[in-house]
C-alpha cells in the first residue's frame, strides 16, 4: 500500500491531495501565493493536516526543478517565487521524504501509463498559465540533467511575436497560453481581461475572441507538428485549463490536419484531467523510491 501526499504547484493554483494506491482520496486547492514567505505559510497550512497519514510528499511544480530547487524559466508566471527551495521547505514543514518534479513531466508520466501499451513515444502538453510539456521517449520519461527536458512551450512560434517572460521573443507560450490569451483580449475587453473571459466570448461566438483562440490552437498545432517530426510521436495528450476547455482540442486537430501526413499524430485530452500532475508525482515517487 502507498499513501503519498501529492502537491501540484501551478502558476495560478496549488492543489494538494492524499493519493492512496494511485487513487485521489482528498483534494484541496488554493490560489498560488507570490512571495516565498507566503508560499511557506500556505504550504504549511495545506500539508500539516495530512502529515500523520502520509509516508512521503511528491510535488509536481511549474518551473525547472533541479536539486529540489524551483527556478522559473518564465518568472512572470510565478511572481516573486523564482529560485524557491521547494524540496527543503516541504521537508522542514513535514519531516517527510519529499520528491519534486516539473508539473508537465509528472502529468506526462500519468497519461503515458493510461495509453495503449504499444505506444513508446508521446508528449503531454499543458496549455494553462504557461505552456508546459513532458516527453516520454522509448517508454522513458525525459527529465534531463538539469530538469529542463520538455520545456517546449518556449520553442519559437513566431520571430515577430510578443515578448515572452523567459527573455525570448515569440515563444509558443507568449501566444498560446491562458495568460497570452488574456493579454491579447485586453485590446478588446480592457486591462482586466483574462484568458477565461476571452474563452467565454469565444464560446458565445465573438469573432475577435475566435481569432485569439484560433491563433493559440494553430500555434499548438504547429508545435505538435514540430515535435512529431523530430521525435516520432505516436500520441499527444492535451491538458491544462485551456487545453481541456470545450472545443479547444477540435481547433488544434483542425489546424494539425492542414500539415503533411508525416507531421500529424493522434491528439487526445488528458484522461486524468486536472489531476494528472498530482497522480504522476505520487506514482513517480513510488516507482523511484519504494521497493
Ligand atoms: C512555464 C514553465 C514550465 C511549466 C509551464 C506550465 C515556469 C515558472 N514555468 O513554461 O516549467 O511547466 O509554464 O506551467 O517557468 P503552469 O503553471 O501553466 O502549469
Ligand atoms: Zn519563452
Image (spheres, grey):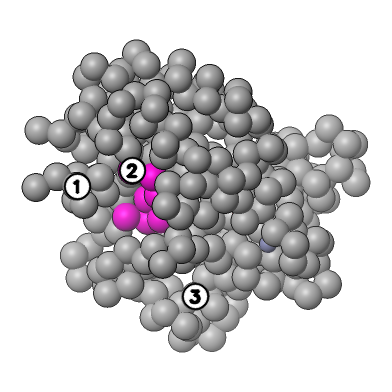
Which one is in front, 130 or 200?
130
Residue 218 horizontal/vertical position (percent): 65, 66
Is there CB contact under 8 Å for labels 3 and 2? no
Which one is in front, 68 or 119?
68
Q: Main secondary structure of the magenta part?
A: helix
Residue 208 to residue 168: above or below = above
Residue 160 to residue 285: above or below = below
Is there CB contact under 8 Å for labels 2 and 1? yes
Judged from the image, the secondary structure of the residue bearing numbered disc 3 is helix
Quarter of the image for the N terminus: give it.
Answer: top left
Query: Can you tell which quarter of the image residue 222 is in?
Result: bottom right
Residue 108 is marked as: none
Could you tell me how far apart the alpha carbons at marks 3 and 2 are, in whole angstroms?
28 Å
Q: Give the class, few, some or many, for how many residues have Cα within 10 Å of label 2's Cα (few <14, many ≥20).
A: many
Q: Is residue 20 left or right of residue 205?
A: left
Label 3 or label 2, whichever comes before in sequence order: 2
- Mark 1 lies on residue: 289
Q: Give the class, few, some or many, for how many residues have Cα within 10 Å of label 3's Cα (few <14, many ≥20).
A: many
| Residue located at (60% from left, 35% from top) | 12
Judged from the image, the secondary structure of the residue bearing numbered disc 2 is strand
| Residue located at (69% from left, 65% from top) | 171
For ligand 2, which image quadrant applies? bottom right
- Mark 3 lies on residue: 227
Query: Can you tell which quarter of the image residue 192 is in?
Result: top right
Q: Give the class, few, some or many, for how many residues have Cα within 10 Å of label 1's Cα (few <14, many ≥20).
A: few
Q: What range is drawn magenta here? A: 99-109
Residue 99 is marked as: 2
Amino acid at each position: 500500500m502507498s499513501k503519498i501526499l501529492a502537491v501540484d504547484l501551478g502558476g495560478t493554483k496549488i492543489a494538494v491531495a492524499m493519493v492512496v494506491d494511485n487513487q485521489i482520496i482528498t483534494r484541496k486547492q488554493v490560489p498560488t501565493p507570490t512571495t516565498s514567505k507566503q508560499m511557506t505559510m500556505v504550504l504549511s497550512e495545506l500539508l500539516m493536516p495530512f502529515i500523520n497519514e502520509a509516508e512521503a510528499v511528491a510535488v509536481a511544480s511549474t518551473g525547472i526543478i533541479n536539486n529540489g530547487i524551483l527556478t522559473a524559466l518564465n518568472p512572470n508566471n510565478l511572481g516573486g517565487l523564482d529560485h524557491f527551495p521547494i524540496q527543503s521547505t516541504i521537508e522542514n514543514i513535514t519531516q517527510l521524504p519529499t520528491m519534486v518534479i516539473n508539473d508537465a513531466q509528472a502529468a506526462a508520466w500519468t497519461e503515458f501509463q493510461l495509453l495503449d501499451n504499444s505506444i513508446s513515444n508521446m508528449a503531454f502538453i499543458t496549455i494553462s498559465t504557461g505552456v508546459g510539456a513532458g516527453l516520454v521517449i522509448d517508454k522513458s520519461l525525459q527529465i534531463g540533467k538539469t530538469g529542463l527536458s520538455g520545456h517546449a512551450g518556449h520553442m519559437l512560434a513566431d520571430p515577430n511575436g510578443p515578448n515572452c517572460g523567459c527573455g525570448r521573443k515569440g515563444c509558443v507560450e507568449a501566444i498560446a497560453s491562458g495568460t497570452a490569451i488574456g493579454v491579447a483580449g485586453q485590446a478588446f475587453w480592457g486591462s482586466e481581461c483574462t484568458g477565461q473571459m476571452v474563452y467565454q466570448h469565444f464560446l458565445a461566438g465573438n469573432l475577435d475572441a475566435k481569432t485569439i483562440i484560433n491563433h493559440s490552437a494553430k500555434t499548438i498545432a504547429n508545435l505538435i507538428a514540430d515535435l512529431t517530426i523530430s521525435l516520432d510521436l505516436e500520441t499527444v495528450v492535451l491538458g491544462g485549463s485551456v487545453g481541456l476547455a470545450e472545443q479547444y482540442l477540435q481547433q488544434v486537430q483542425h489546424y494539425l490536419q492542414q500539415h503533411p501526413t508525416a507531421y500529424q499524430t493522434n491528439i487526445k485530452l488528458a484522461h486524468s484531467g486536472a489531476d494528472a500532475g498530482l497522480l504522476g508525482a505520487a506514482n513517480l515517487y513510488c516507482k523511484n523510491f519504494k521497493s
